[in-house]
Image (cartoon, helix red, strand yellow):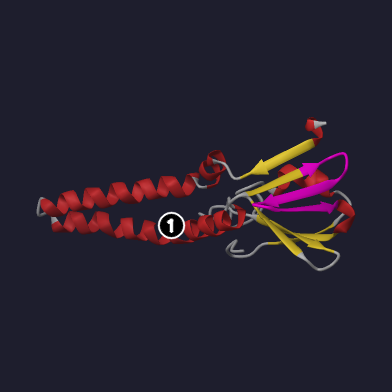
Amino acid sequence: MKDNIQKYKVTLWRHLLIGSDMIFHLFLFILLTVLSVWHFYKLEYVMAFMILLPAFGLFYFLIAPVTLHFQYYNLERGRIIEFDKILLTLTISKKDKIETIKKNDIQKIIINSFDSQNSSRHKPTKKYEYFVLVLKDEKQITVSSLIVQYKKVKEMFDGITKEFISQSENYL
C-alpha cells in the first residue's frame, strides 16, 4: 500500500538542488568582494574597482533567485503533499489542516515551467517552476518546484486539461 503513495515535502536536499546555481553565484560574489577589499587595502584602487564591478553585477542577478526561493519556501513551509496512484487522490497537509482532492475534482492544471526548448533556459531562475491545480469549484492550489517538480507527478494528471505558460520570471 505504501508503494502507491508518493510523499513530498520541503527538505534540505530540495533547497540545495533548486538553489544550487544561486549558492554558487553567492559564493562567487563573496569571493570577488573579499578579493576586491584585499586589493583596496593594498591601495590598488583600480584593481579593486575592476573586481568589485563584476561582483555587484553578479549580486544584481542574485536578487531574482533569492526572492523566488524565499517566496517558494513561504508557500511550501510545513506542507506535505501525498499522491495516491491507486485512489487517484492528492492529500495536502499543512499544520492542522488536511485537504484531500480527487482527480475528478481538478478542472485544469496551469504549468509554468522552463523546458529545454525555451530560450530562457540560461536564466538564474530556470529551476524555479510551479503548477496550479484549478479545481471545479474555482479554488486554486499552487505547488512549487521546491516541494516537487511537475514532471515527477505528471502521470497522476493524465486526462486533465493542461495549460502551459512561460512567464519572464516564475513569481507566484
Quarter that holds the C terminus: bottom right
Q: Residue at x 89, y 52 (%)?
A: 159
Point out residue 112 in the picture as x, y percentages from the top left corner: 68, 59
From the viewer's perspective, tell me whether residue 65 is left or right of residue 48.
right
Q: Is residue 19 above or below residue 1?
A: below
Q: Is residue 64 above or below residue 145?
A: below
Q: Is residue 26 above or below residue 137?
A: above
Specify whether residue 112 is in view. Answer: no
Q: Nearer the viewer, residue 105 or 128?
A: 105
Magenta highlight range: 83-102
Quarter that holds the N terminus: top right
Q: Is residue 138 above or below residue 28?
A: below
Q: Residue at x 59, y 63 (%)?
A: 171
Residue 159 is a magenta residue: no
Residue wearing tag 1: 62
Amino acid type for the residue under numbered disc 1:
Leu
- SS for tag 1? helix
Q: Nearer the viewer, residue 57 or 65?
A: 65
Residue at the farthest bottom position: 138
Q: Nearer the viewer, residue 83 or 31?
A: 83
Q: Residue at x 15, y 54 (%)?
A: 40
Point out residue 51 in the picture as x, y percentages from the top left corner: 26, 54
